């Protein structure tokens, strides 16, 4: 015969209550962990949205930089002050800025002509100045003036004074021409600066095809007369619209 052991009722109830308490505590711990993780997940979602927004903005900015609109040269107008400073720093730069390229050969041609004239006249002035010094010192060893004489011509006592006067006048002439060449070059520079500034100013001048002259009668006050009845006189009013 098999025998069965009888478990006490109190011990079974205690074991059951302990098991229920353990399961309840485990469930509570799981809920607390999920509550802690949920805010972190929401923060991560917000960060991802912010990152996506920044990427979209950067792409839009980059696309705007790449797709920069081209300048319409038909409506572009130069700045007079910028044209003035460019012309002062570099001759011809103002005309390039104003897009008047056809003026460059005139300006640079004027500068090249003045530089050539300045160099040539300075060289001739030095030569005639040395020749004049040589003919004035009465030293036979210094005779650089002979290169200015025609073939077979010699300087003697009869023509000495004439050649002295000739060399002096030519020396002074080439010195004046040298100085004049320098001032003309300054004039070309000033004209290039003025032209660049005025051209930039006139680029905004309204040139309309509606140029009309209107003539109409008018009453002109005349305060010079003593008679009050003649204080006004009839006249003609001319107005020009442009």
Image (cartoon, grey):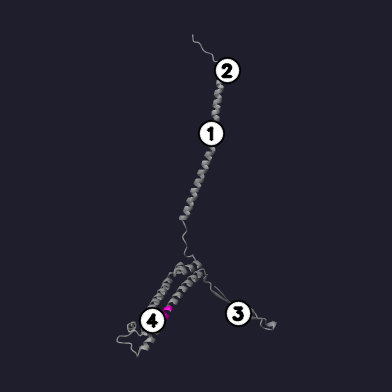
Q: Are marks 2 and 4 in contact (CB under 8 Å)?
A: no
Residue highlighted by disc 4: 129
In the displayed structure, 233 sits above or below 58; it is below
Q: Tell me the tag on residue 33.
A: 1
Where in the figure is residue 163, as x and y percent of width and height? 36, 87
Q: CA distance from mark 4 to mark 1?
A: 109 Å
Residue highlighted by disc 2: 10
How many other residues sit within 10 Å of disc 4, few (<14), some (14-19) or many (≥20)? many
Q: Secondary structure at mark 2?
A: helix
Q: Nearer the viewer, mark 3 or mark 2?
A: 2
Q: Residue at x 56, y 18 (%)?
A: 11
- Who comes first in sequence, dot 3 or dot 1? 1
The magenta stretch is 175-179
Q: Residue at x 57, y 16 (%)?
A: 9
Q: CA distance from mark 3 to mark 2?
A: 134 Å
Q: Residue furthest right?
A: 228
Q: Nearer the viewer, residue 202 or 236?
A: 202
Q: Tell me the tag on residue 236.
A: 3
């Amino acid at each position: 015969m098999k025998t069965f052991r009888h478990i006490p009722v109190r011990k079974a109830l205690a074991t059951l209550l302990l098991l229920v308490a353990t399961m309840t505590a485990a469930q509570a711990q799981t809920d607390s962990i999920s509550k802690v993780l949920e805010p972190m997940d929401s923060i991560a979602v917000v960060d991802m949205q912010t990152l996506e927004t920044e990427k979209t903005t950067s792409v839009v900015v980059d696309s705007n930089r790449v797709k920069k609109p081209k300048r319409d040269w038909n409506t572009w107008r130069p700045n007079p002050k910028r044209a003035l400073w460019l012309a002062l720093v570099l001759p011809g730069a103002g005309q390039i800025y104003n897009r008047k390229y056809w003026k460059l050969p005139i300006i640079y041609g004027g500068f090249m002509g003045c530089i050539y004239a300045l160099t040539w006249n300075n060289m001739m002035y030095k030569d005639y100045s040395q020749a004049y010094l040589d003919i004035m010192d009465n030293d036979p060893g210094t005779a650089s003036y002979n290169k200015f004489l025609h073939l077979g011509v010699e300087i003697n006592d009869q023509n000495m004074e004439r050649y002295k006067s000739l060399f002096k006048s030519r020396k002074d002439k080439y010195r004046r021409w040298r100085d004049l060449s320098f001032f003309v070059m300054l004039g070309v520079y000033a004209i290039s600066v003025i032209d660049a500034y005025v051209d930039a100013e006139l680029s905004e001048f309204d040139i309309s095809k509606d140029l009309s002259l209107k003539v109409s009668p008018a009453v002109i006050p005349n305060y010079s007369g003593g008679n009050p009845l003649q204080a006004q006189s009839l006249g003609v009013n001319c107005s020009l619209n442009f």
